[in-house]
Image (spheres, grey):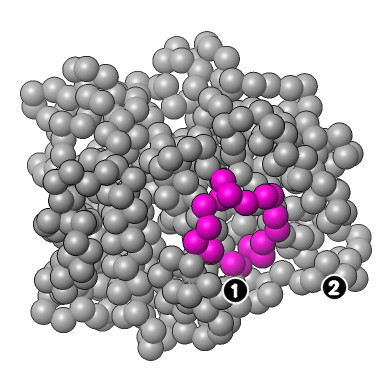
Amino acid sequence: MKLELGYIFIKDIQFAEHSKVDNGTLYVNKEEVKALILEDQNFKSADVELARPGESIRIMPVKDVIEPRVKVEGPGGVFPGMIHKVETVGSGKTNVLKGAAVVTTGKIVGFQEGIIDMEGPGAEYTPFSKLNNLVLVCEPVDGLKQHEHEKALRFAGYKVAVYLGELARTLTPDEVHTYETPSLTEGLKLYPELPRVAYVLMLQSQGLMHDTYVYGVDAKQSLTTMIYPTEIMDGAIVSGNCVSACDKNTTYHHLNNPVIHDLFEEHGKTLSFVGVIITNENVYLADKERSSDWSAKLAEFLGVDGVIISQEGFGNPDTDLIMNCKKIESKNIKTVIITDEYAGRDGSSQSLADADAKANAVVTGGNANEVIELPPMDKVIGYADVADIIAGGFDGSLHADGSITAELQVITGATNEMGFNRLSAR
């Protein structure tokens, strides 16, 4: 399967009478975006704000981050099963507004949304401080249930991202990147001398509002399966979860999964990238056993020599991570796991809730318990008062001057377990 991604680089974002992209600037008609959001009667009001790199702006609480894309050639449309009909994506041509994002905010579950600072020390921990962000501030109608609020806000983000993506449909990309995965038989013939490598992508699916969607299906309702990496680049997997901000995979993370990009970069050079195995994270032991059994079985079926496994979340999912690692290693397939740590504020606690001797090749995204000081910003988009209750915060985190003392957990993407961050250890 072959996909061409055409990057249109966005260097600035501004409000204007007409939405368009011109000379690297994304112009947005604010009223059109608000009207699009308010088509959903679950919202009683909506506002749209801009947040650009280097501005003294804090966005909180952040629900999701989405990159605008549009399918310009080939089957299906971006976000199949959510916005567009269910049709296999991952081939043809897709244009991307690279450097822009839609950020959704709102008080849904309170303790599991995050912070994006556009400048200062907090900005150094999140990749989203480098983007030109269109921020959606949506107020739900009175009495709306949390799961209904989450769904409405999720779809608002997708709709606005598709609206912006359409602006790139007829544009000539600044750069074009081509990604192609051969069939299994073709791959064996093409690179017989190279080690065959697959990627096991663990998807958060541990209960209500801990959801990840694959072609519109909640991952907890699916068995472990295979998917072309280019399908993920076309929006086949989207975030629907409210989990700790630091290691949650937003929709932006899925669209720009760095493990997939790095494996493609090495494909045909140092390894043969076979494809992606997607597996869910579960609550009950029997479900964990079933999913990890299937991960190992598929890795063996694909005849791979090595596997990279990435996790989402911490604590309970550590068991799924180690089960996947152990069982795949038992098939004589080498594994590398990507995780983050909750090692206590002094770094001396056990990093993972589960461990095994076979997990001897580990990449860490950093210690989420590390305490940081976030200075006050000139402007807060959203609601500053949630600082005391979001995961990583505590009673007294928010100070009178607007500064925040908290653990890294509060920053969206700070210890991301795809490695989409700046922290690690050596």
Q: Quadrant of the C terminus?
A: top right
Q: Can residue 39 be seen in this view?
A: yes
Q: Name the residue under label 1.
A: 88
- Residue at image point 21% right, 78% down: 19
Q: Where is residue 260 in the image (x, y as percent from the top left)?
A: 62, 57
Graded by Cα atoms within 10 Å as few (under 14), some (14 to 19) or many (20 or more), the crowding at tag 2 reads few
Q: Name the residue under label 2.
A: 186
Q: Is residue 414 above or below residue 104?
A: above
Q: Where is residue 159 in the image (x, y as percent from the top left)?
A: 32, 68
The tag earlier along the polypeptide, 2 or 1, is 1
- Residue at image point 23% right, 64% down: 40
The type of residue carrying mark 2 is Glu
Graded by Cα atoms within 10 Å as few (under 14), some (14 to 19) or many (20 or more), the crowding at tag 1 reads some
Q: Nearer the viewer, mark 2 or mark 1?
A: 1
Q: Judge left or right: residue 217 versus residue 101.
A: right
- In this view, the residue in front, 41 or 302, is 41
The type of residue carrying mark 1 is Thr
The magenta-colored residue range is 215-231
Q: Judge left or right: residue 194 versus residue 120.
A: right
114 within the magenta span: no
Q: Judge left or right: residue 423 versus residue 392.
A: right
> Dividing the picture into quarters, in which one does residue 364 lie?
top right
Q: Where is residue 239 in the image (x, y as percent from the top left)?
A: 44, 52
> Dividing the picture into quarters, in which one does residue 107 lie?
top left
- In this view, the residue in front, 324 or 17, is 324
- In this view, the residue in front, 220 or 382, is 220
Does dot 1 land on a helix, a strand or a loop? loop
218 within the magenta span: yes
Q: Where is residue 342 in the image (x, y as percent from the top left)?
A: 49, 22
